[in-house]
Image: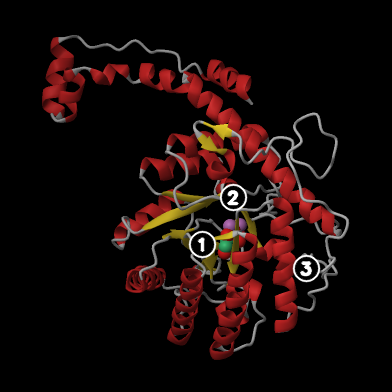
Amino acid sequence: MTSGFFEGIEKVRFEGVDSDNPLAFRHYNPDEVVLGKRMEDHLRFAVAWWHTFAWEGGDPFGGATFERPWHPQDDMGRAKLKADIAFEMFELLGQPFFCWHDADIRPEQGNFADNLRTLEEITDYIGEKMQDVGTKLLWGTANMFSHRRWMAGASTNPDPDVFAFAAATVKSCMDATHKLNGENYVLWGGREGYETLLNTDLKTELDHMGRFLNMVVDYKHKIGFKGTILVEPKPQEPSKHQYDYDAATCIGFLRKYGLEDEVKLNLEQGHAILAGHSFEHELAVATAEGMLGSIDMNRNDYQSGWDTDQFPNNTPEVALAYYYVLKAGGFTTGGTNFDSKLRRQSIDPDDLIAGHIGGMDVCARGLKAAAAMIEDGGLETELTNRYSGWETPAAQAMLESNLDDITARVLADAVNPDPRSGRQEKLENYVNRFV
Ligand code: XLS
Ligand code: NI
Ligand code: NI
C-alpha cells in the first residue's frame, strides 16, 4: 500500500535519447558499463532529505509554497509518513543512496534528550525501509545551523554549553549513521565562522573546532565506524565568513590539527563558485592532496550570486568535474549527492521526480564525456608533453640543489628559455569535441 502521493507516476526507466517521455532517463542507464564499471556504481547518486522533503518552499520574502501531506513537520506520525513517501520516491527513481540531517527526519523537540529519543525511533523506522527498498545511506549529518541555539556557532560557540550540545548532537548522529551502515559522516559548518570580527576571538574558535573534529575522529574509531569523515567547504552563507572557506583552507586546517589522514572533503559545486573558484579547481586541489571524498552536485544561479541549490543542467561543467573524479580513481565511499531543491513554484509531486531525473541525466552525460576524454587521453598527453622537460635527470637533480649551483649552471650554459604556447584555445576546442 502506497501513500498515493506519487499517484499515476510509473517507475522511471532508461528509454534513450530519442524518448520524449518527460519522466524517463535519456542518458542515465544504471547498468551501462563506462570504463569497466556500471554507471550507477560510478555516480552513486543520493537524494538530499532536507531539500527534497523538509524544505517547504520559503524564501526571505515569503513562506511555504509547498503543501505536503507530512506538513506541519512537528509530529512523529508525520515524520514517518515523510519517510514512507521518501522511500516511494527512491523506488520510483531506482535511487541507490540518500542523505539526511537529524533535523530533516525527526521533529524538533527543543531539548537534547527528546531529540535523541525521536532520532533513534525514526532511524529504526528508516532502517526497516532501507531493507525493503534497498536504498542505502551515503551520509548522515547534524543540522547545527537552523535552531536559534546555534546562532553563534556550534563547536566555535563562545558558550561552552553550546559546544557540549553540539558534541552530544554529533555523537547521536554518528551513532545513527553507523546503525544505518552509512558510508560517510559529513560536517558542514554554516555557523562555524563569524558575523563580525569585533565580537570574535578567531584563534580560540579555530582551536575549539580543531579539538572538536579530533573528538569526532576518536569517536569514529571507538565505535568502529568504517565510513569516511568528511568536511564540506563553503566560504559564506549563512555566516558572513565561514572557517571552512574552500578546499585549500580546509586542507590547511586539517593539517594544522593533525587530521589530514582521517578526514576528507565533500565538495559542492555551488560552494566552489561562491568561493570564487570553478568546481574543477576545488576537485583538482582536493585530489592533488588525496583528500577528495564526495561531491554535492548542485549549481547556483550565476546572475543572483546566491547559493540557490539548483539541479545541475550544464553538461560541460559537469563533464569537467567528473573528469577530475575519474582521474582521481573515482569514488570509494563517496558519491554524487543532489544537495538541490526545486524552485518554489514547482509545487507538484512529479516536479520532484523530474528534478532528479534531469540531474541524473546531466551527470550521466558528463560522466560519459569525461570517460571518453580519459579513454582518448588527449589532455593527459598534453600534460605529459608540457612537463616533459622535467623528466631529465638534470632537471630532477636541480630540485635537490640550491640557488648558487643553479645560477652557476645558468651562467655556464647561457640558459635562455624559449617560451612555448599554452595552447588553451586548442585544449578548449578539444574538450568541446566530447561535451
Ligand atoms: C549548505 C550545505 C549543506 C550541507 C549539509 O549550503 O551544502 O546542505 O551539504 O549540511
Ligand atoms: Ni550548499
Ligand atoms: Ni552541501
Can you tell which mark lies on residue 274?
2
Residue 97 position (above or below residue 396):
below
Q: Could you tell me which residue is drawn at 66 percent across and 34 percent down?
A: 315
Residue 343 position (above or below residue 26):
below
User: Where in the figure is residue 239, as x and y percent of width and height?
Assistant: 57, 65
Disc 1 crowd rating (10 Å Cα; few below 14, some 14-19, many 20+) is many
Residue beneath label 3, please?
Answer: 56
Q: Earlier in the sequence, mark 2 or mark 3?
A: 3
Of residues 194 and 312, which is closer to you in this image? 312
User: Where in the figure is residue 391, as x and y percent of width and height?
Assistant: 25, 19
Disc 3 crowd rating (10 Å Cα; few below 14, some 14-19, many 20+) is many
Left or right of 139? Residue 219 is left
Q: Earlier in the sequence, mark 3 or mark 1?
A: 3
Left or right of 191? Residue 293 is left
Residue beneath label 1, please?
Answer: 242
Q: Could you tell me which residue is drawn at 76 percent across and 47 percent down?
A: 12
Query: Which quadrant contains ligand 3?
Result: bottom right
Q: CA distance from mark 1 to mark 2?
A: 12 Å
Of residues 35 and 309, which is closer to you in this image? 35
Identify which amino acid the numbered label 2 is placed on.
Leu
Q: CA distance from mark 3 to mark 1?
A: 26 Å
Q: Could you tell me which residue is drawn at 69 percent across and 63 percent down?
A: 87
